[in-house]
Image: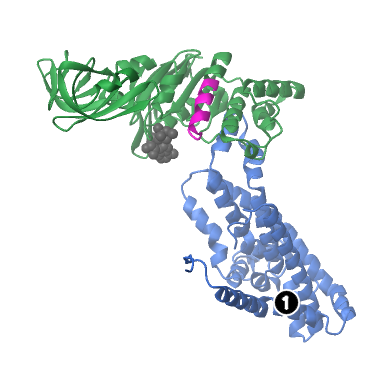
């Protein structure tokens, strides 16, 4: 007599079929293109690829990308911590509006985000004249790129922290305050350490997006080589100029950054199960 | 530290969580706030702590109005329901927190803090566990850490919200003793919240019984048990058989059950009789015995009256075999309330 089968226990062949399908699909959609990027970059050997990366414009793009991330990520750490703290630990009127606003960049197309900044700070924009008079360039300059990147990435950390902080409630903070700790001391010594893994996870996601953002940055950048080109934009320019080896070499570099992020993220998940529980 | 609570009111939205609460707590007293879930115990405790502020009324610590003073300014030690230990700090760091946050000349030296932490660990019998993290402790040990952390600042009053609620029965009993011992050793005025009447009666000097945001009665465990002033208290504290009937000329009648009810006005009434106040009596009312079960030195008898009212009687075990078939009972004492 056959043992009664649990409904969750599918026959072995079905399991194998499903797993194979998933692997084939992943291979076609993810691994193959990724491999193709490296293959294209190295098609004429290692040296041309290295030369493409060593090109001054490429180096400028790498620098700008790193600079953008270096400004965006700390900004979003501060903003994300503050926003999550306000939302998760306090009651105030307009709280749900704030939560909706935090989510806005997720629902708005990055191109629109870029256009908003052009509209506000551009030459024909609301503050255009004023900015020109004072010699401040935002659009088609680094500040615009940073602003657009911040806009696109700011939900990442806040969204990671809000549920975590909510789940932890307020009693630890109340305990700290009742023992004489100030609000700031409590925030740094009690609230923040409790969410440090979630914060790190959010930082990785935010960083990956900050380095990879194309749409919003493309609108505000002006594509000035060596000045306002980030890595993703530089890839596009090289590609449009039929410099495939160059395009793919820089793209491969971007991929490497992404892979490093992924490895860090996985290591984090192994070390601290639960850190990235919500996933994205 | 004496504490006076005067006409304190607190609403959440339109829901009155506390309604004109008045309560005096003597210096060095161990008081239990007892009531069913949702009766406002936690809210009252938080108002006393300064974690919540009342809409009306006053809280006085030693004749000083602290109604709107912060928790820190009141120097309260608060033990939270789930302990609220700092997960990322060691036990020793948790206990030292209240001393570590101090500034300037108020801050004890490092050596002084270490000495104090060791002393507290000894007080709650956790020597040697100072280096552990809360996640490496059992529930009972966490509770002790929470207690010693609250005591570290030498609070003027110690407040505990359902301190044993999350523990299993045996640990609960031993920690009860522990809290009593710590209270007696430190002499700190202590208020603890519980919904477990046995715990309140066992541990407290006095018990305040809360129901729907109102204090129904305050008294010693014996007083609230033996002289309940309302049907709620009578039903909530201790076991009781409940009868609904009427009073006429000092006698309460409900079906076949007749109980003495001197000093109660004629009319509808509700009566309570403790299971141990029912005794065999040839002139009493008839009860059919269904089952006798033995619990240690006592036996509990389940029976039913002629009119179908269920009756529970507690007797000493050697009397148990007299309860078979049809018996006649009367009440040595009954609590009858008009209603
Ligand atoms: N922060 C709050 N917001 C809204 N209602 C609350 C809040 N805290 C308590 N209440 C309500 O007040 C009543 C008393 O709550 P509480 O003091 O926690 O009761 P207890 O501790 O006796 O179970 C409950 O009905 C509860 O729902
Ligand atoms: Mg409660």
Q: Which stretch is magenta?
A: B163-178
Residue B174 makes an appearance in the image: yes
Question: What is the crowding at mark 1: few (fewer than 14 residues within 10 Å), some, or many (at least 20)?
Answer: some
Ligand 1 appears in which quadrant? top left
Mark 1 residue CB less than 8 A from any atom of ligand 1: no
* Picture residue at 53% right of the left edge, 58% below the top: A101
Q: Nearer the viewer, residue B256 or B159?
A: B256
Q: Nearer the viewer, residue A164 or A181?
A: A164
As drawn, is B158 to the left or to the right of B306? Answer: right
Q: Position of residue A43 (x, y in %)?
A: 83, 84
Q: Nearer the viewer, residue A194 or B335?
A: B335
As drawn, is B68 to the left or to the right of A181? Answer: left
> Which chain is depicted blue?
A
Q: Count numbered badges in the picture.
A: 1
Quick one: which residue is furthest to the bottom in this view? A242
Q: Position of residue B335 (x, y in %)?
A: 23, 19
Which residue is denoted by mark 1 in the rendering?
A: A34
Q: Position of residue B221 (x, y in %)?
A: 38, 17
Q: Quadrant of the C terminus of chain B?
A: top left
* Picture residue at 70% right of the left edge, 30% below the top: B130
Chain of the residue that carries numbered disc 1 in the rendered image: A
> Which chain is depicted green?
B
Quarter of the view holding residue B315: top left
Where disc 1 sits, the SS reads: helix
């Amino acid at each position: 007599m056959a043992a009664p089968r649990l409904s969750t226990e599918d026959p072995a062949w079905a399991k194998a079929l499903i797993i194979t399908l998933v692997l084939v699909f992943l291979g076609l959609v993810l691994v193959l293109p990724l491999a193709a990027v490296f293959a294209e970059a190295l098609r004429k050997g290692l040296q041309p690829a290295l030369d493409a990366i060593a090109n001054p414009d490429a180096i400028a793009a790498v620098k700008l990308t790193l600079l953008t991330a270096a400004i965006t990520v700390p900004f979003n750490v501060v903003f994300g911590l503050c926003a999550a703290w306000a939302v998760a630990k306090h009651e105030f009127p307009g709280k749900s509006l704030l939560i909706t606003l935090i989510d806005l960049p997720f629902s708005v197309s990055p191109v629109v985000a870029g256009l908003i900044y052009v509209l506000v700070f551009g030459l024909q924009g609301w503050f255009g004249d004023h900015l020109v008079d004072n010699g401040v360039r935002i659009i088609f300059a680094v500040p615009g790129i940073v602003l657009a990147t911040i806009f696109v990435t700011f939900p990442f950390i806040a969204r990671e922290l809000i549920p975590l902080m909510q789940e932890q409630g307020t009693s630890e903070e109340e305990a700290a305050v009742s023992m004489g700790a100030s609000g700031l001391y409590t925030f740094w010594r009690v609230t923040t350490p409790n969410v440090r893994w979630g914060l790190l996870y959010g930082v990785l996601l935010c960083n990956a997006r900050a380095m990879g953002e194309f749409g919003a940055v493309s609108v505000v950048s002006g594509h000035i080589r060596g000045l306002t080109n980030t890595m993703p934009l530089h890839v596009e320019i090289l590609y449009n100029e039929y410099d495939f080896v160059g395009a793919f070499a820089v793209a491969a570099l971007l991929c490497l950054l992404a892979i490093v992020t992924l490895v860090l993220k996985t290591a984090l998940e192994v070390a601290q199960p639960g850190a990235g529980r919500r996933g994205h | 530290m004496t504490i006076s609570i005067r006409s304190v009111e607190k609403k959440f939205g339109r829901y009155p969580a506390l309604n004109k609460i008045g309560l005096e707590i003597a210096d060095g007293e161990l008081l239990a706030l007892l009531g069913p879930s949702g009766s406002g115990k936690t809210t009252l405790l938080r108002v006393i702590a300064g974690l919540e502020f009342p809409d009306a009324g006053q809280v006085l610590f030693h004749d000083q109005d602290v109604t709107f003073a912060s928790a820190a300014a009141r120097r309260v030690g608060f033990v939270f329901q789930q302990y609220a230990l700092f997960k990322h700090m060691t036990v020793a760091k948790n206990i030292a927190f209240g001393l570590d946050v101090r500034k300037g000349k108020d801050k004890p030296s490092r050596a002084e803090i270490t000495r104090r932490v060791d002393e507290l660990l000894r007080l709650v019998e956790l020597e040697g566990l100072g280096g552990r993290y809360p996640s490496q402790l059992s529930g009972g040990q966490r509770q002790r850490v929470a207690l010693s952390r609250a005591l570290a600042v030498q609070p003027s009053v110690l407040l505990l919200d359902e301190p044993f609620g999350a523990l299993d029965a045996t640990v609960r009993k031993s920690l009860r003793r522990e809290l009593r011992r710590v209270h007696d050793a430190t002499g700190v005025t202590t208020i603890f919240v519980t919904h477990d009447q046995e715990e309140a009666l066992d541990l407290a000097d006095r018990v305040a019984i809360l129901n729907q945001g109102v204090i129904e009665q305050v008294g010693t465990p014996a007083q609230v048990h033996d002289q309940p002033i309302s049907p709620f208290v009578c039903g909530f504290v201790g076991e009781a058989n409940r009868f609904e009937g009427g009073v006429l000329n000092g006698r309460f009648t409900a079906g076949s059950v007749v109980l003495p009810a001197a000093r109660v006005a004629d009319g509808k009434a509700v009566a309570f009789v403790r299971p141990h106040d029912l005794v065999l009596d040839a002139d009493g009312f008839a009860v059919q015995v269904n089952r006798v079960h033995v619990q240690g030195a006592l036996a509990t008898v389940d029976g039913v009256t002629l009119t179908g009212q269920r009756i529970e009687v507690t007797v000493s075990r050697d009397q148990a075999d007299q309860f078979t078939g049809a018996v006649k009972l009367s009440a040595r004492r009954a609590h009858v309330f008009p209603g």
